[in-house]
Amino acid sequence: MSEPAIELFQVSKRFGPKVAVNAVTLSVPQGQVYGLIGPNGAGKTTTFSMMCGYLYPSEGTLQVLGVNPTLPGALKGKLGALPQDAILPPGWEVGTLLGYWARLSGLAEPEREAREALDKVGLAEAWSVQTQALSHGMAKRAAMAQALMGQPPLVLLDEPTAGLDPRIAAQVRQVIRDMKGRQTVVVSSHNLQELEELCDGAAILDRGSLAQAGTMAELTSQGAEFRVQIARGEIIPPELTQLPGVTAARMESPGVLLVRFDGQGHRPEEVISRTVAHLLQTGVLILGVTRGRSLEDRVLQIL
Ligand SMILES: Nc1ncnc2c1ncn2[C@@H]1O[C@H](COP(=O)(O)OP(=O)(O)OP(=O)(O)O)[C@@H](O)[C@H]1O
């Protein structure tokens, strides 16, 4: 297996007496889209800032693309970052500013990079617009374009879709999806549905500490449980637990049957099909089947 793109080992960050990040250990595999989740003040932005090399950890070690990110120039040309509430300097035309930044990053064709990145975020028409004349959503996309230029191996995006209208947010999600496999992307967002859809794995932070980290399938228990929406009919849970692989079955709420299974020894599709077949045979009518639980349910359960 290749070396992780990012590794944190027992990383803490204190601001005076305030512990913003507390002994966090996590690893972001290369080529994945990885989510940072947590309520306000959980430590996401502080963790991001340490990954970018903007902040020194108070304790612990942090490796980004195999180097210490706080060393001068360590990640030059290898990291694209969209900080939270990125502010563009006033008095610049967008295209000129991006071209300038591309040159600073040492990119070979700054203007082409700037145009391509603006196009990706749906802002090609803003090339000659003054930065101070951009709306909040447009400024955010221009800042994101800066993070995309040169297709760096690592892209860190702090709340990339916050404040964007639904069509543009969908376009930004597509840009992130397109990077999967070729670049490593770390995304923080409060939109858990968005993260569930986009991310291969995620870390859930709570008051600075790591509450849970894992693949999206692990976090949503895709390989260990499913729910059946029941329209009509009598459910007899002890009959279901006789089926191969089923370890527990109960009505979670009226009309929702929760089935847990041994995902190590049995394939989900076989357990689900057997259960559904049994229910149909016993006259139960079914409205739908969903694997696992939503990321939102998981996060609400943890926090
Ligand atoms: N420069 C600082 N000085 C003092 N405290 C800070 C500083 N930066 C962050 N904190 C504190 O550290 C904690 C974590 O903040 P952080 O911005 O990392 O959280 P977050 O998860 O990004 O929150 P949000 O979702 O609101 O953006 C908060 O309690 C915050 O007040």
Image: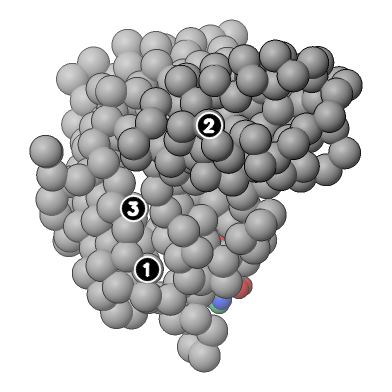
Q: Is residue 34 above or below residue 23?
A: above
Q: What amino acid type is highlighted by mark number 1?
A: Val
Q: Is mark 2 within 8 Å of ligand 1?
A: no
From mark 1 to mark 2, how far is it between C-alphas? Answer: 41 Å
Mark 1 C-beta to ligand 1 under 8 Å: no
**Mark found first going from the N terminus, 2 or 3:** 3
Image coordinates of residue 106 in percent, x first then y, are 19, 31
Q: Residue at x 33, y 17 (%)?
A: 113
Q: Residue at x 54, y 20 (%)?
A: 274
Residue occupying image coordinates x 62% and y 15%: 277
Q: Quadrant of residue 241?
A: top right
Comes first in the chain, label 1 or label 2: 1
Read off the residue under disc 2: 243
> What number is the disc on residue 52?
3
Q: Amino acid at mark 2?
A: Leu
Query: CA separation, marks 2 and 3?
Result: 50 Å
Which mark identifies residue 24? 1
